[in-house]
Amino acid sequence: MIAILRKELVTYFSSLLAYVVITLFLGVSGFYFYSNLSFFLLSGGFDVARGLWQFQLHDMRQIMLTLLPLLTMRLFAEERRLGTLELLWTYPLRDVQIVLGKYLASLLVLLLMLAPTLLFPALLTQTHAPVAIGALLAGYLGLFLLGAAFLACGILISALTDSQVLAAAVTFSLLLLFWVMTWNEAAVGAPALSVLSKLSLFDRFYVFSRGGIDSRDVTFFVLFSAVFLAWTVLALGSRRWRGVK
Amino acid sequence: MIEVAHLTKEFGDFTAVRDVSFTIAPGECVGFLGPNGAGKTTTMRVIAGIFPPTSGTVRVGGHDVQREPNATRRLVGYFPENAPYYPEMSIEEYLAFVARAKRLPRAARRSEIERVIRATSLGEMRRRLVGKLSKGFRQRVGLAQALLGDPQVLILDEPTSGLDPEQVAEIRELVKSLRGQRTIIFSSHILSEVSQVAQRVVIINRGRVVAEDHPDGLARRIEGAVTVHLRAEAPESELRLLLSSVPGVHDLAVVDGRFRFHARDEAVLREVSRAVTARGFLLLELSRESLSLEEIFLRLVHVGDEPRQGAA
C-alpha cells in the first residue's frame, strides 16, 4: 500500500497536476475570501468571527466540487489505458491495498490543498477580530470529510473507464447530482425529500459549516467513502469474469 | 514448477482457454506458440495471478494460484505484451516502485535494482524517463521489472513483438542468458524464434493445446516447413535431376524461372548447395522462406489427425 501511495504522490507532483489543482484552489478561494471579507466589513453588523466562515466554507466547498474530480480522474483510468494495471495485479498486493494506496495519496493532496487556507483566519486574527477556533476547526473537519467523499466517488468512476476526461466529467456530474437533488422540493415531495436530504452530501455539510459536529454526519461521510471504496475494489475484481480490458 | 490441469477460462459467453493441461519442470524453458487470440495471453495471465481459472487448477511451486495468489505472485516475474510503462517515471524511480510493490526487503532493494539494471544493460539510461526511451529499451525495462526479486518463474508475453530485427536479436539473447536456474515461459507467434530459445514448445490454437514437442521433434512433424528458391547457371533438366537426388528435397517445381522446393530444415540447404557446386554449376540464388504459422497449424492438425483417421 505504501508503495502505491508513494508512486501516486510522485506522479501527482511530477505531472504538475497537483500543483495546478492546489494553485487554482488557493487562488479562487483567496478571491472568495477577499470578496466575502469586503462584504462583511462594508455592510457591517455581521458576525465576522463565525458568519464569515460559513460563507467562506460554502464557497470552498464549491471549488472542491469542480477541482477534486481532476485529482481522481487519472488514478485508475490512466493505469488501464497504459496497461500497467495488469502489471500491478501480478505483484503480491491485494486490490484493497491498491485502492487504499491511491485513495490516501489523493487525501494527502487534499490536505495540502486545504492547509494553506488556514492562513486566512490567521491573518484575520492579526488585523481584525479573533476567530472562533472551535467552530473553524469543525468547519474544516467537515470540508475534509466532504472532500474525502468526493475523492472516493471519483476513484470508483476512474476504475470504470480508461478515459480520464470521461472519469472527471462523470464524477463531476454525479457530485453535482448529490448537491442539487434536494433543491426541487415540489418535484420530489416531502417523504422523498427527507430521504434525499439524508443522502445529500451538501445538506450533511450544513452543520459543519455552522461550527457544529454531528456524529451522525461524520458517520455518514465515513460510510459514504467506505462504500465507494469497497465498490471500487469490486470493480477491479470484475476482471475475473470480464477480462483485463 | 508449473502445473496446469484442465484449465478453462471463460469471459461471459466467450471461452478463451479450453481444457488446457501441461506441466513445466523447474529450470525448463518453454515456448508458447500460437496466433493472436489463441489463448496464450489468457493462460499466462492465470499463471501470473491476474485472474483465477473458471475451472481447472494452476499451481506454481506447489501453490494454487487461486487459493494463495500472493504466494504464487512472489514466485513469478511477468512481462506483459507491449511492456506497459509509466511515461513520467525514470527507470530508477520505476524499478524502485516495483521493488517496493513486490515487497522486497528494504536492505535488498538497492542491490536488486543494480543487479537487474546490469542484467538488462540499462546502466546508461537509468535516469532517463521511460516515456522518452525507444521501444527496445522500454522492452528491457519491462524485463527488468519482471526480474526484480529474482523470481524462480519468468513469464514473458511476446517479448519481441513490435521490435526491429536488431532489437529482436538483443532481446532474444537476453532471454537466452536468463535460462538456467529459472523456469521460463515465453510466447511468440514466430516458430523459428521459439525454436531457437525454448527446450520445448507448446502450440496453442483457439484455446486448445494443438501440439507439444521439442523443437527438433516439431521440425520433424512439420517436415517440409521450409520453402526454398534456387537459381543456378545450369541446364534445367540436369539441375532438376540433381536436386531431386538430394535427400530431404520435396515438391520440386519451377516457378518464375527459379526452382522451388520444400525442405525439412536448413541442413537440406547445405546439402543442396554442396551438390550444385560439386557438379561445377554456379549457384546464383539460394533463399528460404518459412511457412506461416497458419500453414504449420494446418500441417500439425493434419498430422495429428492421420493416425486417428487410419484407426477408424
Image (spheres, rainbow, N blue to C red):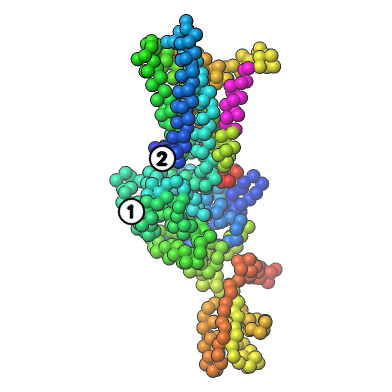
Q: The residue tagged with tag 1: helix, strand or loop?
A: helix
**At 34% across and 51% down in the image, what residue appears?**
B112
Rendered image quadrant of residue B258 = bottom right
Is residue A100 located in the magenta-colored stretch of the structure?
A: no
* Front residue of this view, candidates A80 and B133: B133
Chain label for disc 1: B
x then y, percent, for residue B284 = 56, 86
x then y, percent, for residue B36 = 60, 58
Residue B47 in view, yes or no: no
Rendered image quadrant of residue A180 = top right
In the image: residue A183, left or right of residue B186: right
Above or below, B49 relative to B258: above
> For mark 1, what is the residue?
B114
**At 48% across and 22% down in the image, what residue appears?**
A31
**At 59% across and 25% down in the image, what residue appears?**
A176
Estimate the spatial distance between the alpha carbons at disc 1 and disc 2, rounded to whole Å. 21 Å
Inspect the image, locate mark 1, and give the three-letter code of the amino acid beneath it: Glu
x then y, percent, for residue A223 = 51, 23
Residue placed farthest to the top in the image? A45
Chain label for disc 2: A
| Neighbourhood count class around disc 1 (C-alpha, 10 Å): few under 14, some 14–19, many 20 upward | some
* Front residue of this view, candidates A175 and A45: A45
Q: The residue tagged with tag 2: helix, strand or loop?
A: helix
Residue A138 in view, yes or no: yes
Above or below, B173 relative to B127: below
Label disc, if present, on residue A10 of the rendered structure: 2
Inspect the image, locate mark 2, and give the three-letter code of the amino acid beneath it: Val
Magenta segment: A170-183
